[in-house]
Image (spheres, helix red, strand yellow):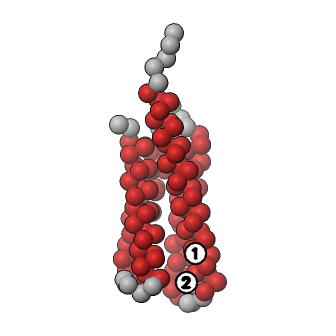
Amino acid sequence: MRAGPVLFRVTSAVLGVQMLLGGLLTFGFISVEAHEAAGFVLLVLAIATMAVWLTTKPSFRLMRVLTVMIVVLILFQIILGFATLGTGSQAIALIHFVNALAIFGATISGTFLVLRWNQMARVPKLI
């Protein structure tokens, strides 16, 4: 199995855990440290995923753009998260939530793109 799709799936799974932790944090079931730690793990995985997709041959341009976009959104998410903690602003918290949904949407679309890419890579050529 190729490294790009596997790493993308692992990143997607960690994103799911991160969103669950965000919900638990919102309702006061966990402390902020667990959400922060998972966020930094997610950032490292997203950067590794981006690096793999940027160097994958044959190139899949859409996945390259998508992984770069996900990393940028996660960096923005971290900035928003610490701004929310520092100020307690509900408006910044709402933007943090909306950005989390954008990251989730990009990851879901990337998951389906990876599935299609894997299927196209396995099709035997008839010539």
Q: Nearer the viewer, residue 101 or 71?
A: 101
Q: Nearer the viewer, residue 16 or 55?
A: 16
Q: Which mark is residue 109?
A: none
* Element at label 1: helix
Pinpoint residue 68: horizontal percent, then vertical percent: 56, 53
| 117 up-or-down from 75: above or below | above
Q: Of all residues shown, which one is farthest toward the bottom?
A: 88
Q: Which residue is mark 1?
A: 96
From the viewer's perspective, tell me whether residue 3 is left or right of residue 74. Answer: left
Q: Earlier in the sequence, mark 1 or mark 2?
A: 2
Tag 1: Cα neighbours inside 10 Å, few (<14), some, or many (≥20)? many
**Kind of residue indicated by mark 1:** His
Amino acid at pointer 2: Thr
x, y percentage for residue 19? 46, 69
Q: Which residue does the image show at 41% across and 74% down from the upper left?
A: 21
Name the image quarter holding residue 41: bottom left
- The answer to the question of whether label 1 and label 2 lie on touching residues, with beta carbons closer than 8 A, is yes
x 43%, y 43%: residue: 4
Q: Is residue 89 left or right of residue 16?
A: right
Q: Is residue 14 above or below residue 67?
A: below
* Residue 40 drawn above or below residue 125: below
Rendered residue at 55%/37% (across/down): 60
Cα distance in 3D space between marks 1 and 2: 8 Å
Q: Is residue 73 visible?
A: no
Could you say which disc has been placed on residue 84 in the image?
2
Taking the image as shown, residue 100 lies to the left or right of residue 40, namely: right
Give the side of residue 65 with respect to residue 114, left or right: right
Q: Secondary structure at mark 2?
A: helix
- Which residue is pictured at 45% across the width and 20% down the height? 124
**Front residue (pair 88, 111):** 111
